[in-house]
Amino acid sequence: MEEEQIYFLISFFTIADRYPPQTMNSINKDSIIRTRRSNMTIGIDKISFQVPNYYLDMTDLANARETDPNKFHIGLGQDQMAINPETQDIVTLGASAAAKILTDEDKKDIDMVIVGTESSTDFSKSAAVIIHNLLDIQPFARSFEIKHACYGGTAALQQAHDYVSLHPDRKVLVIAADIAKYGLNSGGEPTQGCGAVAMLITKEPHILAFNNDSVFYSEDVYDFWRPAGHDYPLVDGHLSNQIYIDSFTRIWEQNKKINQTSSEDYAALTFHLPYTKMGRKALRAIFPEMPEEEQQRLEARYDEAILYSRQVGNLYTGSLYLGLLSLLDNSQLVAGDRVGLFSYGSGAVSEFFSMTLMEDYKKYLTSENNHTLLAQRKRLTIAEYEKMFNEKLPTDGGSHSFSDPTDFAINKIDGDIRYYNK
Ligand code: COA
């Protein structure tokens, strides 16, 4: 018998033990195959993020757009928005996020660099291979980009998990990096932002372990998309809100059925955060099924998980993971606590899965640095923001130099090749 088949049978009977017969009838074969994994602990060993050194205050934006600031601060749940100069792109942000956590030893052990993004600067060459070079990761590695709207980071993370489960002594670097732009004076303008989250996926991780309980959902819908040639996405904002909530409630029901869980099993639920009110609406959509103290407990954790996103705005693929990082840095969760993660990418693909906190995980976070990174940014005036927003890298094929001393910033573009500080 092949190893795969033995594995399947062992998994089937292990799962059959866990679920009563009437439940087994409702679990299809696919979900059993999905649950089939080794006992090895795999997860996030290190995690960090990077944002550009500029931000716009949402009160300033509201005043400039003749809108009540409460619409942005309360209605959308956003206080500040990260803004990038033209010299800082997904490569700059992704490389900077990863450089903070990788040791020389890690760089020898990494077999894959995966960048989840919907802000690619090239239809062919991936940001991952450039980051691989900038970080001096050993050459016999795979580097590639992965896409489905804001879901790409999760696709990368799950791919990383699967690779490490087959190659336990190797590591995978996952980067979720994006520049979320809808255009000046557009409906989506207050829900912009940018940044990158980097995660090192290994066996016996120090921070969080996968529970191998993913539930997925796909629906072919046009709520947000960016056809080739468009600088900004086309978006039906209110439809995207609706599909997001519908996707969450459906996947939550499916999760309860397949994984036999309820809200009590989760110390916290984290969400994709295009703006922080969005996840709150989804969370509140399942409140009717739980007692009031349970609602308050989950909402208190939610408030801890959105502290960073309130100051950064939308990171597209990175938003869920910035929320996770904010929760880890700002809550008092303890080892063994289970955190639920809801990933949503318009178009639409979503996934719900959970991870469990490891012993002493706080020791392996870079919480102080994260707070400092946000506190040290420069506040832009509206005029500076609009100027920065409109600046575009030249596309004439000529040679142009830039002086941005930031780590990994673009210092030259020549023959349509971007050169980065190393
Ligand atoms: N004080 C407090 N709250 C206010 C307010 C005020 N003065 N004015 C409006 N609000 C509230 C509204 O009641 C609404 O809250 P609700 O959603 O809980 O009902 C919220 O602010 C947003 O108001 P709305 O009129 O819906 O804003 P909008 O028409 O400008 O659209 C988005 C908001 C998010 C749809 C829009 O910014 C967008 O398209 N963003 C990009 C797409 C996106 O992020 N989608 C998310 C899913 S991926």
Image: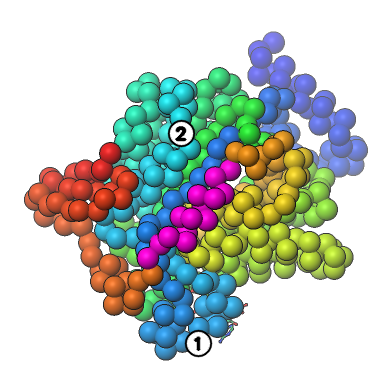
Q: Tag 2: residue type?
A: Leu
The residues tagged by marks 2 and 1 sit, at their Cα atoms, a distance apart of 44 Å
Q: Is residue 312 above or below residue 138?
A: below
Q: Quick check: is the Cβ at mark 2 less than 8 Å away from ligand 1? A: no
Comes first in the chain, label 2 or label 1: 1
Residue to which mark 1 is pinned:
68
Residue to which mark 2 is pinned:
102
Coordinates of residue 410 in the picture (x, y in percent): 24, 49
Query: In the image, what residue occupies the spot 81% across and 49% down?
Result: 265
- Residue 5 in which image quadrant: top right
Query: Is residue 246 visible in this depiction of the protein?
Result: no
Name the main secondary structure of what is drawn in magenta.
helix
Q: Is residue 169 above or below residue 71?
A: above
* Residue extent of the magenta highlight: 365-378
Query: In the image, what residue occupies the spot 52% across and 35% down?
Result: 200
Q: Tag 1: residue type?
A: Asp
Query: In the image, what residue occupies the spot 59% across and 78% down?
Result: 74
Q: Quick check: is the Cβ at mark 1 less than 8 Å away from ligand 1? A: yes
Residue 371, magenta (yes or no): yes
